[in-house]
Amino acid sequence: MIIDFHACPSVDLSLIRDRLSSIGVTRVVLQPIDALPLFHLLPNDFFRKLSSEDPHSALLWSKFILRLTSMWSPRMYDNVKLWYEAMHHDGFFVPFASINPSLGIKYVYEKLNELAGLNVRGIVVSPTLQLFDPINTRSFRAILEYVEKNNMLLIMHLDPCPYNVDICFKDLMPDILNELLERYSINLVLSALGISEGMAYPWLERIAKIMKRYDRVYIESTGISCILFSTLMGKSFVRSVGADRIIYGGGYPYLRLRQVVKNLNCIESSGLPKRDLESIFHDNAVYLLRNVDIDVENEEIENKVN
């Protein structure tokens, strides 16, 4: 059995279910990102500072976000719509929510209140696509406090970064997590969606230090499965942090199905013991989800309005 911890609800959910079921996936965690097309152009301190310090990088970054988000379905930023659509698939999907901290504290509180009536146990944020500073943004602290208080998962996309924008990698990558994890007792899943091979070594090196320091940090393999399981650098990382801290993520449809299959094959042919493969593909996700009151081993996941 395979639990895919990362599918993007940017296309029809029936298509996602059909495609992923065909390669043996039995449950899917939906990870939206609340980055409405053009919303990143609204004034915010982070982007204003970047524009004044490095206008070329700001331009590249804004074009990157616009290209990525312009075709997204409303499911990516409408948590209620996503939840209700997912509910009609007999528990195949576990829908998480997303809230954009760059839109201000009032917006964040409204979205958090919206979640109170839904059985949503994880919140997804992306500093890269939502353009916020994880350390100094007050509205993000409100999300962290809510996650901690309600025993939820926080999923952070620390990538993708637009190529040739060094400030993105420098300012938003793993080192920021130390301060967050010192302040808040939360379970954190790191997504590596889209990380390039050239960035992988310093990224994984820094992630390993954090994972050794905090046992409540997990890494999800979206976009880097072949780096993790088919390169000497990646295999060293896996040995260092242990298979019980790695969760399989496919990244469909951001990654095409053939890319998902390729990444899946990299894990299956890695030479890891069967027990480790079972942990990565299934058991680690079951443990994390059960820890936030979602039992994916039931025949049908309960989606109830509280």
Image (tube, helix red, strand yellow):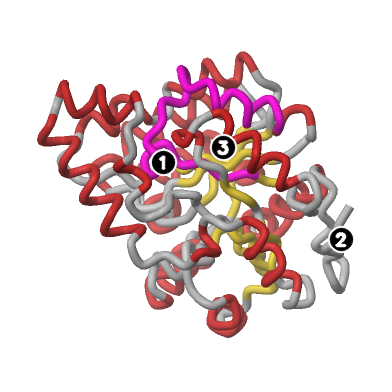
**Disc 1 crowd, CA 10 A, few/some/many (<14, 14-19, 20+):** many
Q: Which residue is mark 1?
A: 130
Residue 45 lies in quadrant: top left
Q: Earlier in the sequence, mark 1 or mark 2?
A: 1
Q: Is residue 116 visible?
A: yes
Is residue 126 inside the magenta stretch?
A: yes
Label 3 SS: helix
Q: Which residue is mark 2?
A: 304
> Label 1 vs label 3: CA separation?
13 Å
Q: Give the quarter of the figure containing the N terminus.
A: bottom right
> Label 2 vs label 3: CA separation?
25 Å
Q: Where does the magenta region start and end?
A: 123-146
| Horizontal relation, residue 195 to residue 190: left or right | left
Mark 2 residue type: Lys
What residue do we see at 28% from left, 33% from top? 168
Q: Which residue is mark 3?
A: 107
| Horizontal relation, residue 194 to residue 48: left or right | right
* Residue 63 pos. (x, y %): 21, 50
What residue do we see at 48% from left, 60% from top? 270
Mark 1 vs mark 3, foreground winner is: 3
Mark 2 vs mark 3, foreground winner is: 3
